[in-house]
Image: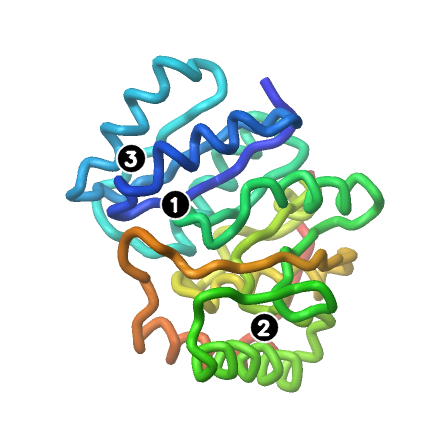
């Protein structure tokens, strides 16, 4: 068993999931993988089960009844990982927009003293590939907007490539995380910050998916836009562990 677990939520990722699993498993550092699948109609879960025969003690699958949202998938994965005593717990997309090789760099930042490390598009050395200019500008504006409202000291506030040390997730009241779309990413960073944890950013190149469809919707965008205000007035309490 590794000390690190990579949580990958999936919905209709049959075109990516096998290659993603093989890529993570081939890294020079050891990472276990937990796939949280929301009953994908394209058979994603069945492909994971086939790979479990090869990676018996390193690949795990959580199957859920239906599409319940990104945030709830990660919360379920966090709780599962905490029960199994992992020291480093990662979030990552299934579609290769996040480069699996960067898992090592995120972990090293936490080993080096950060409590939480964000793979950032918007610091020096970071980049975005295959996005239209207007989408890049919208994403950068969203992060600037979040920083302006919350004073969160993170440049890429909506980033979904993250390494948490165990103590961060243990200290949070995970049942009190309310957002389920991309505002979830903002809420997790802001909660860690308000609880006094050190957040680092390492530059990554984010590459838009080639296979499959984006899960972004106007409903998700509106949740992030208006939800930021609520975070400023929320009470944050540390859990004992």
Residue 9, numbered label: 1
Observer-side mark, 1 or 3, equals 1
When asked about the image quadrant of residue 40, the answer is: top left
The residue wearing badge 3 is: 63
Mark toward the start of the polypeptide (2 vs 1): 1
**Would residue 86 appear left or right of 207 to someone viewing this image?**
right
Q: How many marks?
A: 3
Distance, label 2 to label 1, CA atoms, is 27 Å
Left or right of 89 in this view: 40: left
* Label 1 secondary element: strand
Point out residue 198 in the picture as x, y percentages from the top left corner.
Answer: 78, 57
**Residue at position x 41%, y 45% in the image:** 94
Residue 206 location (% of width, % of height): 53, 59
Choose top left, top right, bottom left or bottom right for residue 102: top right
Crowding at mark 2 (Cα within 10 Å: few <14, some 14-19, many 20+): few
Q: Is residue 58 above or below residue 34?
A: above
Q: Quadrant of the N terminus?
A: top right
Who is closer to the viewer here, 165 or 203?
A: 203
Circle 1 Cα neighbour tier, 10 Å, few/some/many (<14 / 14–19 / ≥20): many
Query: Residue at label 2?
Result: 234
Q: Are marks 2 and 1 in contact (CB under 8 Å)?
A: no
- From the viewer's perspective, is 100 left or right of 63? right
């Amino acid at each position: 068993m590794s000390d690190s677990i990579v949580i990958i939520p999936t919905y209709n990722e049959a075109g990516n999931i096998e290659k993603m699993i093989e890529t993570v498993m081939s890294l020079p550092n050891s990472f276990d993988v937990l796939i949280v699948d929301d009953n994908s109609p394209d058979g994603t879960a069945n492909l994971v089960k086939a790979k479990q025969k090869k990676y018996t003690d390193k690949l795990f699958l959580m199957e859920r009844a239906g599409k319940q949202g990104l945030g709830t998938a990660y919360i379920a994965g966090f709780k599962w990982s905490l029960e199994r005593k992992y020291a480093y717990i990662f979030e990552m997309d299934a579609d290769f927009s996040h480069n699996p090789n960067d898992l090592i760099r995120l972990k090293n930042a936490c080993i080096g003293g950060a409590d939480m490390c964000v793979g950032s598009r918007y610091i020096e050395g970071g980049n975005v590939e295959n996005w239209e200019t207007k989408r890049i500008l919208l994403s950068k504006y969203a992060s600037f907007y979040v920083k302006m409202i919350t004073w969160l000291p993170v440049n890429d506030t909506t980033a979904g490539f993250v390494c948490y040390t165990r103590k961060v997730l243990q200290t949070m009241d995970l049942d009190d995380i309310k957002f389920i779309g991309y505002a979830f990413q903002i809420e997790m960073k802001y909660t860690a910050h308000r609880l006094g944890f050190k957040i680092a950013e390492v530059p990554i190149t984010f590459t838009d998916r080639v296979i499959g469809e984006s899960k972004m919707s106007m409903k998700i965008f509106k949740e992030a836009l208006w939800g930021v205000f609520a975070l400023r007035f929320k009470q944050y309490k540390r859990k004992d562990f």
